[in-house]
Amino acid sequence: MQTQQWPVFQLVSCLLVLSQLVYFSYADVGTAAQYSPPYLPTACYGDDQTQFPSSNLFAAAGDGIWDNGASCGRQYLVRCISASQPGTCVEDQTIQVKIVDYAPTAQSPPSTQSTTIVLSETAFGGITNIATNSINIEFQQ
């Protein structure tokens, strides 16, 4: 009987060790661009100046996360993971942005079309070291 339990014990031990070594990410991967003022009016809150966080970390949602306007007010954690030019991303820097607009109808055009999210100048500058039109991001609501 003990010889049959030993393989089960080894299997459980092995799975426990592997679970500690594997990193599980619950974030999605997408692309981000930036946009500049004027930011008003927005698709979410119109001309209301109070929609913008005091940190100026806000964004316009692309089609993939717009959800027919349900994304208005959502908060996303965003991290730059790569770009066409090495050294673009600020290492280990994550920002939290609030969705205030819909990218295709934003007052000012994004630096690149059809991205997952379009970040304010402040937000984009917070996760990039150098000027670029778009970056690859990891994001999570």
Image: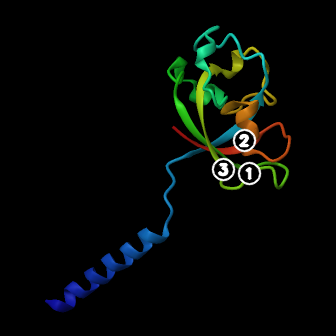
Q: Which residue is most to the front?
A: 54
Residue 130 located left or right of residue 97:
right
Name which quarter of the figure residue 132 lies in.
top right
Q: x, y (%) of residue 118?
A: 70, 30
Pointer 1: residues within 10 angstroms few (<14), some, or many (20+)? some
Label 2 amino acid?
Gly
- The residue closer to the viewer here, 137 or 77, is 77
> Which circle's residue, 2 or 3, is located before the other in the chain?
3
Label 1 amino acid?
Val
State the residue at coordinates (59%, 16%). 50
The mark found on residue 93 in the picture is 3
Task: Quote the CA–CA distance across marks 3 and 1.
Answer: 6 Å
Evaluate if marks 3 and 1 touch, with contact meaning CB atoms under 8 Å apart. Answer: yes
The mark found on residue 58 in the picture is none
- The residue closer to the viewer here, 30 or 71, is 71
Tag 2 residue? 126
Label 3 amino acid?
Gln
Residue 127 located left or right of residue 17:
right
Tag 1 residue? 90
State the residue at coordinates (70%, 19%). 104
Secondary structure under tag 3 reads loop
Q: x, y (%) of residue 46?
A: 62, 8
Task: Quote the CA–CA distance across marks 1 and 2.
Answer: 8 Å
Q: Which of the image's four quarters has the N terminus? A: bottom left
Residue 78 located left or right of residue 23:
right
Identify whether 4 is placed above or below 138. below
Secondary structure under tag 2 reads helix
Identify whether 78 is placed above or below 121. below
Task: Quote the CA–CA distance across marks 2 and 3.
Answer: 8 Å
Secondary structure under tag 1 reads loop
